[in-house]
Image: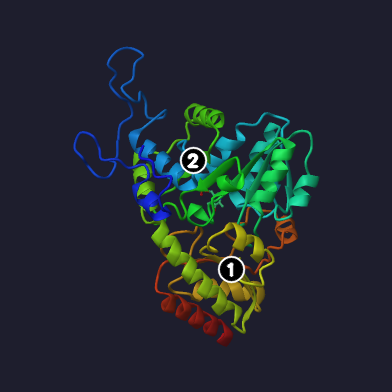
């Protein structure tokens, strides 16, 4: 593995994990579409013995992701973001307690409450943007603090350094789900997190064509335990998926710069619009956690959410009137998306829980893509006009 640790992010994104293939010189890591490997003698492997345990295309992806998050130890990749999240939580034992954010990705909340809670793990959901509230929720059984920052869909920001301090003092782990920010914007391991987890389905892959997840750690013992779970449980990504994700990584810096630029301008546009009630974007001065965001992030990301004065019905109409912003779940691809969290991505969260976390039923979430800003702005403008007239 080349030492890229002192080089710039763009160089790391282009070169991380990829070495010319030794036999042919292929500059891009091939898709090693094989389930098993011929061994020179019993119980001796050339490199790998079986593709659940290891695969060269997956190796390249795992090194690339670790390079971007600033770890010398390869990432541990899974078949989806959910499998990666599950991989971390499987390090815990029945009876252990987890403190998790109250504004989590709907699928994470569902995994915690509907599956893992039945198996003896205990969860307390608190607003992780309030480190004192997290500290207060600690019990002697707390083993893990789980935070997303920015959160989905309200884009609340948690102070990762403050949470890392709480975790360190309590002798427990801190996971940061870095899916929304990506390492282009925020590097949680540098801020003291134990685990970084990604749904690489989103910005890392970046082209809405592959599902995947990865965990990055700096601790060699935790890495070994995660690899054991990866192999033992078997929720591994196939080589094609690893190849596509690795290809996405090579332009992460270019795409993220454009996502951030476009999103910031769209947030300004919406904030100034008479039909818009409220805009959530950490780059706005008026955002409740703007200072923390400015401290720990180098830009403010590609996600914007907002409420219309027209409430639930206005939001529903808007989602159907945009043309470039396509109505779909997911985020982080080059194409812009629009959705209504209460009825789509967050429908698995109980209405009372959603509302308690401040997620209004009429909230609209945008994943601002890499198109021309003027076209995106015009698309929202015409859709807002159309609902005003209807
Ligand atoms: C999408 C997402 C996940 C789940 O990842 P999948 O790849 O869909 O399994 C987890 N966390 C966040 C923040 C996400 O956006």
Q: Which residue is mark 1?
A: 283
Which residue is depicted at the point 30% across and 24% down? 37
Q: Which residue is disc 2 drawn over?
A: 71
Spot occupied by residue 284 in the image (x, y as percentages of width and height): 61, 71
Label 1 SS: loop
Looking at this view, name the residue that lies furthest to the bottom: 389
Residue count near mark 2 (Cα–Cα under 10 Å), binned few <14, some 14–19, many ≥20: some
**At x 41% / y 40%, what residue is drawn?**
63
Residue 82 relative to residue 102: left or right: left
**Displayed quadrant of residue 387:** bottom right
The quadrant of the rendering that contains the C terminus is bottom right
Lateral position of residue 85 relative to residue 377, left or right: right
Q: Is residue 209 left or right of residue 108?
A: left
Seen from the viewer's position, the closer of residues 114 and 148 is: 148
Q: Residue furthest top?
A: 42
Quadrant of the frame with the N terminus: top left
Q: Position of residue 375 (x, y in %)?
A: 42, 78
Q: Residues within 10 Å of mark 1 (few under 14, many from 20)?
A: many
User: Which mark identifies residue 134?
Assistant: none
> Tag 1 or tag 2, which sits nearer the N-term?
2
Asked if residue 307 is positioned above or below residue 221 in the image, the reply reads below
């Amino acid at each position: 593995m080349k030492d890229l640790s002192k080089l710039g992010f763009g160089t790391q994104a282009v070169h991380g994990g990829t070495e010319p293939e030794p036999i042919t010189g292929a500059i891009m890591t091939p898709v090693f579409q094989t389930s098993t490997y011929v061994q020179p003698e019993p119980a001796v492997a050339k490199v790998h013995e079986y593709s659940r345990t290891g695969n060269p295309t997956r190796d390249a992806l795992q090194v690339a992701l670790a390079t971007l998050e600033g770890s010398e130890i390869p990432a541990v990749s899974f078949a989806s973001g959910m499998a990666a999240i599950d991989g971390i939580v499987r390090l815990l034992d029945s009876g252990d307690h987890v403190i998790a954010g109250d504004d989590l990705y709907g699928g994470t909340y569902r995994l915690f409450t509907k599956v893992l809670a039945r198996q003896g793990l205990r969860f307390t959901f608190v607003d992780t943007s309030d480190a004192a509230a997290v500290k207060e929720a600690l019990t002697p059984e707390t083993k893990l603090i789980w935070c997303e920052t920015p959160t989905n869909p309200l884009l609340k920001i948690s102070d990762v350094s403050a949470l890392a301090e709480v975790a360190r003092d309590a002798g427990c782990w801190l996971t940061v789900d870095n899916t929304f920010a990506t390492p282009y914007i925020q590097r949680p391991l540098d801020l003291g997190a134990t685990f970084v987890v990604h749904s690489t389905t989103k910005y890392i892959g970046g082209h809405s064509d592959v599902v995947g997840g990865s965990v990055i750690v700096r601790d060699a013992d935790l890495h070994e335990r995660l690899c054991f779970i990866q192999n033992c449980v078997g929720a591994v990504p196939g080589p094609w998926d690893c190849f596509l994700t690795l290809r996405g990584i090579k332009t992460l810096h270019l795409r993220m710069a454009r996502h951030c630029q476009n999103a910031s301008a769209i947030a300004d546009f919406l904030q100034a619009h008479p039909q818009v009630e409220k805009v959530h974007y950490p780059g706005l001065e008026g955002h409740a956690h703007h200072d923390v965001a400015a401290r720990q992030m180098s830009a403010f990301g590609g996600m914007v959410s907002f409420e219309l004065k027209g409430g639930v019905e206005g939001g529903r109409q808007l989602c159907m009137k945009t043309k470039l912003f396509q109505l779909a779940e997911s985020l982080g691809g080059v194409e812009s998306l629009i959705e209504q969290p209460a009825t789509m991505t967050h429908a698995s969260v109980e209405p009372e829980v959603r509302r308690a976390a401040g997620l209004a039923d009429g909230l609209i979430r945008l994943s601002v893509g890499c198109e021309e800003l003027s076209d995106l702005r015009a698309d929202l403008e015409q859709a807002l006009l159309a609902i005003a007239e209807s």
